Image: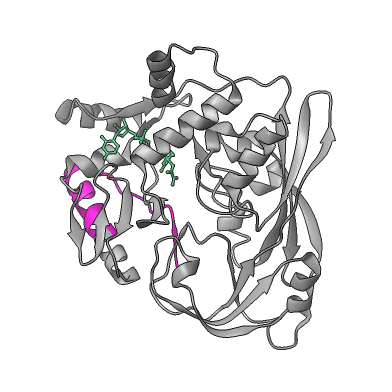
Amino acid sequence: MHPEHDVSLKSLNTFGLPAVARTLVRVSSESEVRRLIDDPQLGLAPKLVLGGGSNVVFIRDVEPVVIKMEIMGRRVVEERADCWIVEAGAGENWHDFVAWTLDQGLPGLENMALIPGTVGAAPVQNIGAYGVELADRFESVDNIDFMTGRTLVLGAQTCRFGYRDSIFKRELAGKSVITRVRLRLPKPWIPVLGYLDLERKMAESGNYAPSARQIFDWVVAIRRAKLPDPAVIGNAGSFFKNPVVTEEQCRDIIGRDPEIVHYPLPDGTVKLAAGWLIDACGWKGKSIGQAGVYEKQALVLVNRGGAIGAEVVTLARAIQESVYGRFGIRLEPEPVVV
Ligand code: EPU
C-alpha cells in the first residue's frame, strides 16, 4: 500500500472530468485494504471507492481518500444442480468478465455485455440492460467494513437491490468496500429475448433461437450503435433513471402526449423512457459549455472536450427543469455527483 498524493482523476473517470485526489491508494488484495484501514492516518479518514469511474461526476477535487480498486482474479467456484457460481475480483473489467464466462461455456450474463465499469461497481448500482439486471444473477459479495476491517459475505436480501440502486448507494455508502463478487448462472440456460431491440435483431437475421454468444454479439452491436464509447467521447452511460409514475399520472400525460414511450410494470405503475422525455423537450444534440446531450440517445450526457463537472451538473439541472415544466416529472440522476 503506497499512498499517492495530488493524483489527477481525469483518466480515472469515463466522463473525463478534471479533478485531483489529495490522496489515492491502489489496492490489489484484501490484505492491502486491511493495511489501509489499520493505517494510523488513513484508517479513520473518509473514503471514496473508485472502480472504473463510469458512474461518477467529479465537480471538485476529492478530499476523501480515494481507494482505487484493483483486486483481480476470475474463477468458476462451483457447479450446483441448478446453477454455476462464478466469482471475480472487484477490480476486473465487467465486460471482460462477461466475455470470459461465455468462453468457459457458461451463459447468463450476455444481455449485460459492454456495460462500462468494474465488477465491484456492478452491485452498487445494480447494473442492467436488455431485460436482465445484476440482481437476477446475484449470489453474494465479499465486503470489508472500514471500521472493523472484517469481511462480511452479503447475500441478495442484505444488498436490497432496486432499480439502479442497492444498500451500497445508501446505508453502506462510504462505510465499506466490495472486494469480490459471486454470480449465479442458472441451469438450464434460458435466453432473455423480450426486449424490443433484440426482437428486431431476431427478425432481421431470421434467427429466433440465438446462442448466448449470438445475443452477446447483438447486444454489443446495439450498444455500439446507440451509446458513445467512453474511450472516444466522455460519458457515464444513462445520466437519469427512467422515472416510474402512477397509472393516473401516465394517463394524464398520454392525454397530452399520445406518443410517450411507456412500459406498464407488474405492480400497476408505469415506467417512462427518460430519453424520450428529454428528446421531446428538444435537448438532443444541445450543449451547455462543453457538456452536451448525445445526438443518438438523449439520456446520455457527453463531454464534448474539456468539459468540467459544473457544466455537466448545470446541463443536467436545465434538463430536469424543462422536463418538470412540461411533464411534471422529476428526473433523478443515475451517477453519483462527488
Ligand atoms: N428514446 C427516444 N429518444 C431518445 C432516447 C430514447 O425517443 O433520445 C426512446 C427510445 O426510442 C425507446 C425508449 O426511449 O423507445 C427507451 O430507450 P432505450 O431502449 O435506448 O433504453 P433506455 O431506457 O434509454 C435503459 C437503461 C440502459 C440500458 C437500456 C437497455 C436506464 C436509465 N437506462 O435505457 O442502461 O442499456 O435500457 O436495457 O435504465 C445505463 O444505465 O447507463 C444504461 C445505459
- Ligand 1 quarter of the rendering: top left
> How many numbered circles does the render carry?
0
Q: Is residue 189 visible?
A: yes
In the image, residue 298 above or below residue 103: below
Describe residue 50's horizontal placement relative to residue 83 as left or right: left
Q: Measuring 61% from the left and 46% from the top, which residue is drawn there?
A: 96
Is residue 48 located in the magenta-colored stretch of the structure? no
Region in magenta: 316-338
Q: Measuring 60% from the left and 77% from the top, which residue is drawn there?
A: 46
Residue sitting nearer the eye, 176 or 220: 220
Residue sitting nearer the eye, 30 or 306: 306
In the image, residue 127 above or below residue 195: below
Q: Quadrant of residue 282?
A: top left
In the image, residue 215 above or below residue 272: above
Q: Measuring 42% from the left and 70% from the top, which residue is drawn there?
A: 58
Where residue 288 appears, as percent x and y from the top left, is 20, 63
In the image, residue 71 above or below residue 62: above
Q: Quadrant of residue 214?
A: top right
Where residue 11 appears, as percent x and y from the top left, is 46, 69
Is residue 323 located in the magenta-colored stretch of the structure? yes
Describe residue 126's horizontal placement relative to residue 139 as left or right: left
Q: Quadrant of residue 118?
A: bottom right
